[in-house]
Image: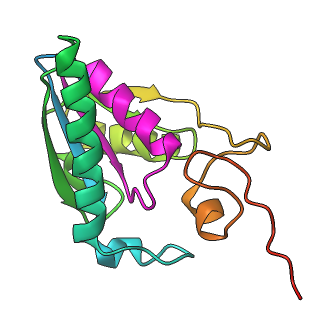
Amino acid sequence: MKVMVGGTFDPLHDGHKRLLTRSFSLAGPEGDVVIGLTTDTFASRKTHPIHPFAERKSDLEKFIADFITAQAAQKKYATHWEVEPLSDRFGSALDADFDAIVVSEETLPVAVEINRMRREKKLRKVDIHQITCVLAEDGRWISSTRIWRGEIDVHGHLIPPAKSG
């Protein structure tokens, strides 16, 4: 099975890790995972600072390599994967031959739009697999924006406000 997933992945947090591990699980040991990583230009639309593409790609590759190594030790996965630049909301998903896309609750509408646009191009629709977002200690979603604001860390632990004075 060929699975696509995409994002900015900055900083790489537990919600992103759930999205990625679900993608590999779905693809299976003989499958392929294509990870669209937003380009610096596309990511600049965010309301918070973004690390450069090369740095985000390196962090992503390290997580995946560690994950694959751990899974291989358990004889679970040897999945092929690649990271491709994502310069818009759709990337290669509008034209590529693939079976499934993995999204969060937040990005589900994009996957629905991808299938609509694929139908218009007479391409087969792809299965949409939605993960539930990972919650922080306060019961709200872990998000890069909250991490950048200093509210939570990458695992969703609350960061106490700095004392003034």
Please identify the quadrant where the N terminus is shown: top left
Number of marks present in the image shown: 0
Identify which residue, 20 or 4, lies in the foreground.
20
Relative to residue 77, is residue 132 depicted above or below? below
152 above or below 117?
below
Q: Which residue is drawn at 27% across and 27% down?
A: 24
Where in the figure is residue 77, as x and y percent of width and height? 18, 19
User: Depth check: 158 or 101 in front?
Assistant: 158
> Could you tell me residue 153's position as x and y percent?
61, 55
Percent coordinates x, y for residue 94 in the rendering: 23, 47
Task: Residue 50: give x, y in percent of width and height.
Answer: 43, 74
With 113 as the anchor, is 60 left or right in this view? left
When the figure is inspected, residue 74 is found, relative to residue 59, above or below; the finding is above
Residue found at x 50% / y 73%: 46
The extreme right residue here reads: 165
Q: Does the magenta stretch include residue 5?
A: yes
Q: Is residue 5 visible?
A: yes
Question: In this orientation, which residue lies closer to the viewer: 111 or 10?
Answer: 10
Q: Can residue 99 be seen in this view?
A: no
Residue 30 forms part of the magenta stretch: no
For the view shown, which residue lies furthest in the front direction? 165
Residue 3 placement: quadrant: top left
Between 161 and 40, the one lying in front of the other is 161
Q: Which residue is drawn at 58% across and 30% down?
A: 132
Residue projecting furthest to the top:
75
Specify the segment rendered in magenta. 1-26
Residue that appears at 35% across and 44% down? 114
Specify the quadrant that holds the C terminus. Answer: bottom right
